[in-house]
Amino acid sequence: MNPYILAILLFGLGLGTTITFASSHWLLAWMGLEMNTLAIIPLMAQHHHPRAVEATTKYFLTQATAAAMLLFASVTNAWLSGQWDIQQMTHPLPITIITLALALKIGLAPVHAWLPEVLQGLDLTVGLILSTWQKLAPFALILQINPTNSTILIILGLTSTLIGGWGGLNQTQLRKILAYSSIAHLGWMILVLQFSPSLTLLTLLTYFVMTFSTFLVFKLNKATTINTLATSWTKAPLLTSLTPLILLSLGGLPPLTGFMPKWLILQELAKQDLALTATVAALSALLSLYFYLRLSYAMTLTMSPNNLSGTTPWRLSSTQLTLPLAISTTMAICLLPLTPAATALLAP
């Protein structure tokens, strides 16, 4: 892609998110989300491949539906209460519709079905943008409306953690596994949103760091299936020995970074007398852990199979920058000791 066009599209992405962040009026927030969608579509379709085009079409249709729902709900809210202000949402009907529209935007279960399909059709770089940056603007809106309907949030959160765990069990495609991992993590964030918004933000940030690291590892290995991952030890042995730690951090095992948000969320849910919810969420984390363990096993504990799909591809030395990978990997593995600092910052 022409670097000038790429720069304009990335600028559009940044501008769309910033407009949504800065807006207090529903129309402006909607406009920011639309700019965001329109800027990423050429990036998604840049490889003229039927899968990429199909993924782009699916993405466009779901995002357009969500944006239409959002606009409809905000107009309904203005009609019912005379308010266009995001923070002044009082009527339960628009709040519920907007919560569902934003859930569709970020891919929460049960409106998640587009996310694995779309991510599967994209290359890893655009997939990374879709899994991280594209979640920011809708999340800012969810945090601002602070939905009063607590039941819907808990249902969305629990279904997402369960489906995110179950869906990834049978996958061999890494991008689909990462999509289900994304759904599960978003479920954890939504669960605790109404009790501690700052904890949701902390979870979002740690999820970004771990996902960024995972995508960069897969990109360096040019790996899209578990089979190609099994041959990565010939190319980057040291990185291959660190990758299971990143994956287990995504799964939320101590003493890795990913344990911190899960620990704090379970503590918060227990404080709110939601022991059953906390138990279901913790058990669903075991499902996710299984497929991270499966990836780790394929990478480090198996000799690569000698069939055609598993033969080592021809390797040229990679041109990818390794500094972002080094920083994000260190952060994804070593940040757990900073938990007291994080909790001090989170305290109201």
Image (cartoon, helix red, strand yellow):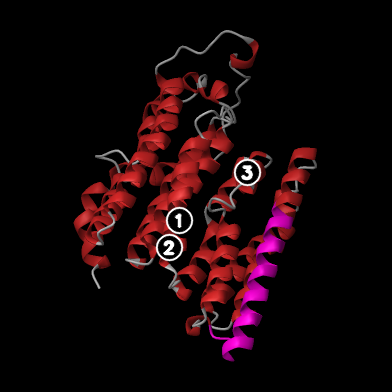
Q: Residue furthest top?
A: 306
Instruction: Name which residue type carries label 2.
Output: Thr
> At label 1, which amino acid type do we have?
Ile
Q: Name which residue type carries label 3.
A: Leu
**Residue 227 is drawn in which quadrant?**
top right
Which mark lies nearer to you, 1 or 3? 1
Q: Which residue is mark 2?
A: 151
Residue 135 in the image: above or below residue 160: below
According to the image, label 1 marks what residue? 155
Q: Nearer the viewer, residue 213 or 157?
A: 157
Q: Is residue 132 visible?
A: yes
Where residue 67 appears, as percent x and y from the top left, is: 67, 67
- Horizontal side of residue 341 vs 61, given as left or right: left
Q: Which stretch appears magenta?
A: 59-85
Secondary structure at badge 2 equals helix
Give how far apart the Cα atoms at labels 2 and 1 are: 6 Å
Q: Give coordinates of residue 264: x percent, y percent.
A: 26, 54
